[in-house]
Amino acid sequence: MPDKWEIVQDTHGHPLLADILMIHVSLLPSGKVLGIGGSQHDQNAPKPFHSVLWDPAAPQTMRVIPFPGPDPFCAGHCLLPDGNVLVAGGTDKYDRAPQNPHGPHHFTGIADCFIFEWRTEQWTQAARMANPRWYPTLITLSDGRVLCMSGHGGTSQLSHEVLETEIYDPTALRWKPPRATVPKLEDTGQFWLFTMQRPMIYYTRLHGLADGRIFSSTALQEVGGRRRTRILDVSNNMLTTVGPPPCGMLVPLMSHVYSRSNFTSVLLPLIPPKYEQHVLIAGGRTARRFDLETLMPRWRRAGQRRPYPMRAYTTGLLLADGSTLLIGGGRSEKVPRWYWPWSEVGGYDEDANFIPERYLWEQDTWVEGSAPTDYPPIPRMYHTCALVLPSGAVLVVGSNHDSQRNDGGSRTDHGHHGQDARELRMEIYSPPHLFDGVDANGKPHPAQRPEVGALPTDSAGYGDPITLTSPDAHRIQRVTVLRCSSVTHGYTSDQRLIELVIDPTSRTAQSLTVTTPPTPTLAIPGYYLLFALDGAGVPSVGQFLLIG
């Protein structure tokens, strides 16, 4: 089936330019998209900083909302159970700032935290963390609390990594005291003559498992040990080794995408009755998959060899039909690797991948999509974000041209003085399951989607029955819930798709009954999009459902 690309247009029919570089995006229960950029990868960006709201129902304009705090550039964020967005950390000093004691290649973090309330569309200040952090990961736990892990510390801290975890309690409105892991993690960042020799652990790729523990696709290294694939038990902060690192045991770390943070990681769909758990990573020369249910788990090749040698900076998304979409990314990455300061290479627009790919996890195979044909393709490299909308289509925003930055509003790198490093155009990508062929003009023809009436409730507990009314009840073969995404740097920690059990005795010509997931460890509390799919995988329009 065909797929389709479109540029979001303004009221004059021109490409709508976002007011900021949207480095952090979240889908709110209102259906609107929150975008944050802070200083937008510009050391001398104007202040104050702003966030934006974009409404797919009124796509031609964008609302600007002032951000009340210091720079949230490269903060961590996630969706709380009530649908509000928690933002923690951000940037204090840029790596090239003369006041930065850590020197080149190091951004120092802040401890400030803020919450965006989706009903009032306003920011409020939250309790500060104990540790300043830049590039931290936030993930919502099964009890509704939030785990914060990793990141570069503040200006006054001597280590390059924050090795303690912190937990935010949205009921008590405070952070618990930081705790070291057991065994303790090691500060792996290593520089010699201002050159990075070993990568640091930033934006750790974390996923909540069905037993409540946290799986890390990013290999973690204990003091005096080696990098390994590990699981964290937040009840006692114990780390358990479950396999070798995804970057391999003998490959030099600095030469491997999977040893850093330029790859994507996705918890594959959870299907009853067993809800077996598999994790996909992509962005390196080979996409890999970790099957947690096997006797001896390990990373293995995911599917056949793909035509792209690398897809650094790609974003991985679960679609309504359970396939995993890889969008954006490039055949090279910008990384300081055994070079003098600031001689960073790779990540150029000319290396961009314009062809999306989908991983069909049950068949363990890859399927290619197509590049835009109605306009020149837009490179989506470093600082690209993408998320699934209620329509089932995908919003694609952001990117720094050639993975470069601005300084005072424009680029200063050789040959590009005065140009804007920010990609502000927005695109909508519609995957193949939204079409059933092409029309007489060769354009994708929309599929007839199952119609589902308004849900009888906007919230449900665990193991609760929900009756769906639909004139297409006979066509509906599957029902899935997809947790709303909060995305940055190619990854969303809370993303998960769970198939619901259909009661076969409940089906009538106009309705059917499904049961929500049985536990909060399977369905992390929060807002989900509910999709009903026919036998061809064509989804209904998603409806928001609060689970938990």
Image (cartoon, rainbow, N blue to C red):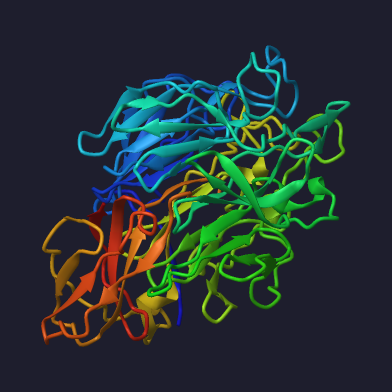
Does 368 appear above or below 521? below
Q: Residue at image x 55%, y 39%?
A: 237
Q: Residue at image x 25%, y 34%?
A: 121
Does 160 appear above or below 495? above
User: Would you say 245 lies left or right of 90 here?
Assistant: right
Does 231 appear above or below 514? above
Q: Residue at image x 55%, y 67%?
A: 356
- Image quarter of residue 63: top left
* Rendering coords of residue 174 (x, y %): 36, 25
Can residue 346 be seen? no
Can residue 301 be seen? yes
Residue at the limit of the structure toward the front, as seen here: 236
- Image quarter of residue 523: bottom left
- Observer-nearest residue: 312 or 115? 115
- Image quarter of residue 506: bottom left
Does 39 appear above or below 231? above
* Rendering coords of residue 475 (x, y %): 24, 86
